[in-house]
Structures are given as C-alpha cells and as structure tokens.
Image: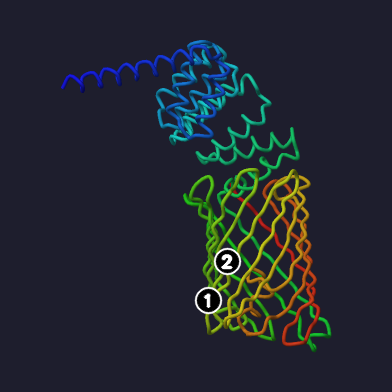
Amino acid sequence: MRQNHLTFKKVTLLFIFVCCSQYSFAQDLSSDELFKQARTAAFDEDDYSKAILLSKQALEKSPDYADIRIFLGRVYTWSDKKTEARKELNIVLQKTPENEEASIALANVEFWNDNSKEALKIINVALKYHPTSIDLLLYKARLLNDIKKWSEAEEVVEQVLKQDAKNDKARAMLIKIKDNSFKSQVGVSYEYVYFDDGFNGRDPWQLASVDYSMQTPIGSVIARVNYANRFLTNGFQYEIDAYPSFSETFRAYMNIGYADASIFPKYRASFSLYADLPKSFEAEAGFRYLNFGSDTWIYTASVGKYYRSYWFNFRTYLTPSNSDLSRSFSFSTRYYYSGTDDYIGIRIGSGLSPDDSSNANLIGTSNYKLISNNINLEYRKTFKTFNVIRLTFGFENQEYKVNTRGNQIDFGISYSRRFR
C-alpha cells in the first residue's frame, strides 16, 4: 500500500512539473509567437481548444492586440460559442469602431446563425467608416439577397461594378441577384432554321415560344408553350421550368415537358444541381430525359468561371446506348460590356445537345453516333431597365444520317419584359 502511495505522489509531482514547465515556456514566448502557434493549432491541427488557450495567453501579454482578439472571436465562432465570440469582437469594436475585419467577423457570427438582419446592421455601421469598401459592399449585397431585398442588393453590387468593372465576384453575384429581383417576366422568341442542298431539299424549320415566369419563395418558376413547324408538320410542346435555391451554395434547374406531335419528344424531363464554388467558379451535374416512343437518358456536367468581365464554361453531354457512349462537348464564353443582361457570347461545340431545340428531335432516333460541329453567336441587350432583347446566329455542319452531311443556319430573336 505504501509503495502505491509513493508511486501516486511521484506521478502527481511529475504532472505538476510538466504543467509548470509548459506554463513557464508559454510565459517566455512573445504574443506574436503564441499567435503563430494558435493559428497553427486552428488551421493545421484542427484543434480549436488549443488555439483558444494559446490566444488567451497571447492576450494576457498584449490585451490590445486586435488581430489576436479578432482571431479568438473567429475560433469561438467556428466552435459554435456565439456568446464568447460576440464578447471578444465587441471589445475590439468598442476601442476601434472603424476596424473593418472585426465588423466582418462579428457579422459572420450573426449570419452563420441565421440572423442576417442583425449582420446587416453591423455591416451598415462599418460602411459609415469605409463607404467604398468593396468587401463590405459585397457582404451587404449578400445579406440583402438573403433577406430577399433583391432590388437593394442589385443596387449595391452595381455600385461595386462602377468602382471595379472587372470584379468577377460582383459579376457572378449580380447575375444571381438579378434573376431574383423581378417578380415576373413575359417573353417571346422566334427561330428560323435554314438547310442547304446537303439536306436534299429539306424545308426550313420555324420555332416560336411564349413564356411567363414568376418568383416564388423557393425560386423562379417558368411556364412555356413552344410551337414548331418541322418536316411539314406542326406541333406544340408544353414545359415548366423551376430554379429552386437550397442554400448560398446549391441551386437547381428542373424541367418537365409534354408534346402532342412527333416533332417534339413526347415527354421530357431535366434536372441539374449547381454549386457556387470559391473564386467565382461554378459546377453542375445532371441529366436530361427524352421519350420519342423509347427512353433516352443523357447525362451532363459543366464547369464555369467568372473572370473580370468574362464568363467561361465547358460542358459535356454523355448518352449511353447499346453498350456504347455518345459524347458531345461545347465551350462558351461571354463578355459583359455593361450590366448582367448586356453581353456578347460565342459557343463552339461538337455533337448534339438536348438543350438545343433545333436538335432535340435528332437525339434518340438513331443508334448511330451522328457527328455535328457548330458555332453560335449571341448578343443580349437591356434597354429602359425592364426590357431585354436577344439575337442569335448559328452555323452547324451536321451528319443527319449515316455518311450524309449538310449545313444548317439558325437565326433567332427573343424579347422579354420584366415586372417588379
């Protein structure tokens, strides 16, 4: 029993010695060195408790070291300790209310805890000290978008683009906000498709559509009626599109359609999930379903990037058939010369796209891999705020049956009127 008691005393003394040694070592370190260790603990080791302890030790040495206290507030936020985070960040703002980094960190506490209105108050105070700060203005637009004040959010992002027309983050944000800022929209479009002699005298195709879209609590919903005259046959197709938003990161595209004529697929359905990624990237994956009497499944994926006044996108469609796989690819780019609806675009592709109304009837009707090379130009312009006009021109060299090719030329025009 005495031996066990002596062993316990030795272990206890050793523990006290180690703790005192570590404390003494921490006492010898400067606040900067402790801060560096705290950042390593948080970012490299994912040890928030250790980062908090080291930050507190650093603040004992330098209580007015704002960067350390802001970092401590952030780590408390990541640890879901909201009260402690608010306390540390408010200490900084009470001493230096103009501290932009502390304001953003405090706004993050509220935003990440579903309190965007309170976060907006914090950012508005910060903007009094830094009225032209792009980071603060973009944060404000983000918050306004979250509480569905889309018109105000749009104005803020446009203010940023006036300061920095090549800000790709602002450009990407404005496009998403603008889609939400109008309560409803009416649109009409017309497309004429001409075929050269390679198509053996095929008559021109004509396509027209009328659509109506409206904003709902989950996102925009669009009802559309399409008319086509193809192969000397008339027909109608009826579609509904939806663009639900699930979070700041994820949104979707959904479509269902029905047609009463063979020149359209009898049934169609589409789904794509979009992810808004860091550095103004976006990614998409989904499927397209067409039924021309039998089922055709097409899978699609794309990656896009906003860079200054440009948007780039690469897309592929993959169609499995009889243990084979048909592929189509396209590369698109747009140059935004003014607002979000004001751009010039070009798309270059190879293969057939199920999202192209002039080609949809050729997909799923043949087991042969039809070859197509195409180029499309697009011009889009807003006038008097609520009106958008779009002009398109396309050229396609297409194999419409085995070893038989022809050229087709597309002309299109559309007009949309928005309402707030």
* Residue appearing at x 17%, y 19% in the figure: 2
Most extreme residue toward the right is 197
Q: Image quarter for residue 177?
A: top right
**Kind of residue at badge 2:** Arg
Residue 328 lies, in percent from the top left, at: 68, 70
Are there few (<14), some (14-19), or many (20+) residues within 10 Å of tag 2?
some
Residue 151 lies, in percent from the top left, at: 59, 40
Whether label 1 touches label 2, CB < 8 Å: no
365 up-or-down from 133: above or below? below
* Residue appearing at x 57%, y 23% in the figure: 36
* Residue appearing at x 56%, y 69% in the figure: 288
**Kind of residue at badge 1:** Tyr
Marks 1 and 2, the one that precedes in the sequence: 2
Q: Quadrant of the N terminus?
A: top left
Q: Image quarter for residue 283?
A: bottom right
Residue 261 lies, in percent from the top left, at: 58, 82
Badge 2 element: strand
Q: Image quarter for residue 79?
A: top left
Label 1 vs label 2, nearer the camera: 1
Disc sitting over residue 224 in the figure? 2
Task: Give the alpha-carbon distance from disc 1 to disc 2, as whole Å.
Answer: 14 Å
* Residue appearing at x 57%, y 25% in the figure: 124
Residue 132 lies, in percent from the top left, at: 68, 26
Disc sitting over residue 130 in the figure? none
Q: Is residue 358 left or right of residue 322?
A: right
Q: Identify the residue under disc 1.
A: 267
Are there few (<14), some (14-19), or many (20+) residues within 10 Å of tag 1?
some
Residue closest to the eye, 22 or 192: 22
